[in-house]
Image (cartoon, grey):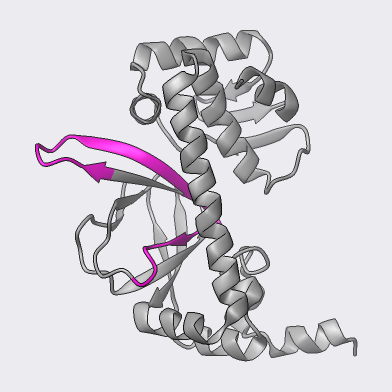
Amino acid sequence: MTIKALNDVEIPQVCRSCSARHDGMCASLTPAELGVLATHTRHTHHRPGEALAIESDEITSYANVTDGVVKLSRVLRDGRQQLVGLQFAPDLMGRLFGTESPITAEAASEVDLCRVPKLVLETLVAGSNELKRRLLDQSLQELDEAREWMVTLGRKTAAERVASLLLLVASRTAGGSEASPVSFELPLGRGDMADFLGLTIETVSRQISKLRNEGLVTIENHRHVTVPDLAALRRRAG
């Protein structure tokens, strides 16, 4: 039996079929650490629109996104809501070492989560430099994406904003690959896209039609998007 086969035997059964295990935080854990984690996790499935975390609620657990897309939003005192980000597999959902959730998280598509009690994950983080590094890398990636989105909203045209959003989803769906074509289910409706991009619904619809006419995307059934050439879409996104 090979070393890889021996290691696979040591991996908890529930983790072996997890598509996010090799890319998310769990990739940095030893089989023994995975075993500890697996005894405390629970797997949940959520329908689009279902609340996953509520702003200002006490944090009692974290969740690894194993499939689907999560949308993050903030709510102002007068009830106005602003979409502020998206999370994909294998992102960690929740503010590590926080006491209250700083955002509201909602399933944008069918979402599968691997939920971990707060104390269990924080104990693992405290004892694993590899896990600390993995979660730090994710936090820095989210910071980079937030800064890039500031540029998108502050400087880009309407056409570039819509192209940037489609590029974001396509890139994360492709797992960082430049493979062409890339197909995905658009997790946001026109209203959410408009909210996220600071545009009107009519403008979003017009710009999507232009991208279709330019051959940069094809769309079936309003949500199934195919990007024939990621590099071409990236150029269109500015």
Magenta stretch: includes residue 237: no
The image quadrant of residue 108 is top left
Q: Which residue is at the front of the view, 213 or 54?
A: 54
Residue 17, given in percent of the width and then of the height, sits at: 65, 71
- Answer above or below: position of 131 versus 236: below
- Answer above or below: position of 76 versus 155: below
The residue at the point 37 percent across, 51 percent down is: 47
- Answer above or below: position of 165 versus 13: above
Q: Specify start and end residues of the magenta stretch as a single range.
A: 74-97
Horizontal relation, residue 12 to residue 104: left or right? right
Horizontal relation, residue 104 to residue 179: left or right? left
The image quadrant of residue 171 is top right
The residue at the point 62 percent across, 44 percent down is: 173
Residue 90 visible in the current orientation? no
Residue 132, given in percent of the width and then of the height, sits at: 55, 73
Q: Residue furthest right?
A: 1
Residue 205, given in percent of the width and then of the height, sits at: 44, 14
The residue at the point 31 percent across, 68 percent down is: 98
The residue at the point 48 percent across, 28 percent down is: 151
Q: Which residue is at the front of the view, 164 or 174?
A: 164
Q: Which residue is at the front of the view, 36 or 102?
A: 102
Q: Quadrant of the C terminus?
A: top right
Magenta stretch: includes residue 95: yes
Residue 114, given in percent of the width and then of the height, sits at: 47, 69
Horizontal relation, residue 180 to residue 41: left or right? right
